[in-house]
Amino acid sequence: MCEANAYLLKDNREELIMEAVDVVENEDGLLKMRNIFGEQKTVKGVIKRMALVDHKIIIEEA
């Protein structure tokens, strides 16, 4: 499977904000995420790093 977990970077720590993310869209500085279960979440931030082999998306708050 190709989904990843999304983490918000806070105080140099990674805080899990969504599991099994399938889609990430950037709309005017907002990252809209949807996972394989149909759950959705919007975060104001930028993608700092993606480690797809580790199934991780690291987001930095804007």
Image (cartoon, rainbow, N blue to C red):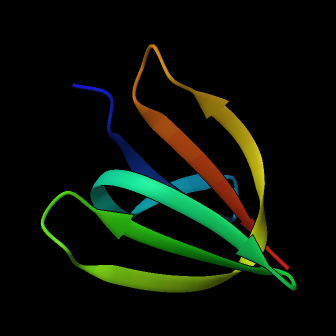
Q: Is residue 58 above or below residue 32?
A: above
Which is nearer the eye, 25 or 52? 25
The residue depicted at 36 percent of the width and 51 percent of the height is 22
Which is nearer the eye, 30 or 11? 30
On screen, residue 30 versus residue 51, left or right, reads: right
Question: Where is residue 9 drawn, in percent x and y?
Answer: 64, 60
The residue depicted at 40 percent of the width and 29 percent of the height is 55
The residue depicted at 23 percent of the width and 79 percent of the height is 39
Q: Is residue 56 above or below residue 29?
A: above
On screen, residue 46 versus residue 52, left or right, reads: right
Instruction: Answer with the quarter of the image where residue 24 lies.
Output: bottom right
Question: Where is residue 50 drawn, in percent x and y?
Answer: 64, 33
Question: Where is residue 3 drawn, in percent x and y?
Answer: 32, 38
- Residue placed furthest toward the left: 37
Instruction: Answer with the quarter of the image where residue 53 lies.
Output: top left
On screen, residue 44 versus residue 37, left or right, reads: right
- Residue placed furthest toward the top: 53
Q: Quadrant of the N terminus?
A: top left
